[in-house]
Image (cartoon, coloured by chain):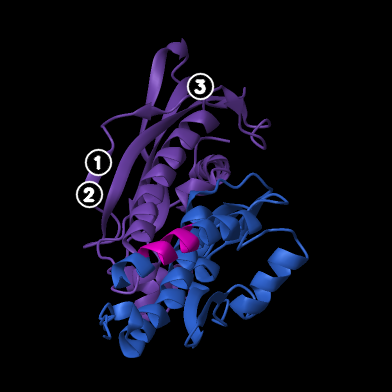
Amino acid sequence: MPIDRESELHIRAAIAEMIGAVPEVGYVRPAPQYFNTAAAFWAAVEPSISTQKEIEKRPINATWLYPISIRDDPTSGCVDSPLTYLTYEIYTFAQYGEQRENTEDVAVFENRVLKAHADFVAGWLGIKEQFQRYANIAGLDADFVTAQTQPTVQIEPTGNAMVCEFIPRVVGYAVRQQETVRLKQAG
Amino acid sequence: MQVFIDLNSPIFNDVARRQAVSGFPRQQSRDFKNLTKRRIIESRAGGRLYKRKGGLGFTRSHRASASGQRPAIDTGTLLNAISDRRISEMSAEAYIAPASNPKGGTSADVYAGYLQDNLDRPIMSESDAAEAQVKANRDAVSLVLTLC
């Protein structure tokens, strides 16, 4: 099987599964899916969160996964069957509460803010930890002699006060990591 | 000869004393509520990992609390349901308000009772109550001193 849509989706699902084992990364979506507003995000992801108050009380915490590049390694294999590197971007975003409700205690609010950041850091490091080894992707043995994840690479520092790439006007912490899968076709 | 001493401190004024003291229980219950919330936020869950499905192909996982630990925050419904209220002039309480729980339609107070009593996930712990008691006694002394 060549690297086609089915095999790519299979690989992406496997990576999403690994990311999903880290609870702090929040919702994981293996697609670069956009939303117009925070309300649209919640309407699609958790329809039970529907009122303005519920939306304001529930900061968005999510990770998007999508392929961004593919390249062959000319020094390994041949033109017909090269070693191929398929790279994915892992975009993790954690919204933070911008305003304290009048009824909420200052110390409780500050604890929430600190926890949001602590969870973001835990999610970011958790993803790194998940890929901190060469792991074979199951289910591709018949078509690929090599289908292996590698340690992630972080291409830019974590950001504070970042507007979410997939939901405009939602601000929080964000980080991009890249995961490159090594693929070598069978035969 | 008679000597009169005018006890004009607010502590001898019925209205002033009752006004000052009647707000005390509510303030203590509010402080206990906030302490409980902070402890839940600060706790780190060490239980099982559960997978949850959202809409549109979104998935997520949730690390539950282990037995004896405070409940891990998942949707935040339970945390937000921790409230306080005045019961009478001299009593107030921190309690779980019966907000609906979107996970199963169970009311938050029923869910909290189940967590605490059946699953040993203390929401309001004895140690917090003891801490609150010490603080309340200290605050009571301060209150009396401000009235004198």
> What residue do we see at 53% from left, 35% from top?
A2
Please give the name of the residue rendered at 70% of the width and 65% of the height, measured from the top-left corner: B116
Pointer 3 and pointer 1: residues touching (CB < 8 Å)?
no
Residue that mark 2 sits on: A162
Comparing marks 3 and 1, which lies closer to the viewer? 1
- Which disc, if any, is residue B114? none
Q: Which residue is rendered at x = 40% and y = 22% of the image?
A: A72
Q: For residue A152, what is the image quadrant?
A: top left
Q: Tell me the residue that label 3 is attached to.
A: A81
Q: Is residue A103 above or below residue B64?
A: below
> Which residue was labeled with disc 1?
A159
Mark 1: secondary structure = strand
**C-beta proximity under 8 Å, tags 1 and 2:** yes
| Amino acid at circle 3 | Ser
Nearest the camera: A67 or B114?
Answer: B114
| Chain at numbered mark 1 | A
Say if the magenta span includes residue A123.
Answer: no
Q: Position of residue B24 (x, y in %)?
A: 41, 75
Real-space Cα separation, disc 3 to disc 1, in angstroms: 39 Å
Q: Colour in which chain B is shown?
A: blue
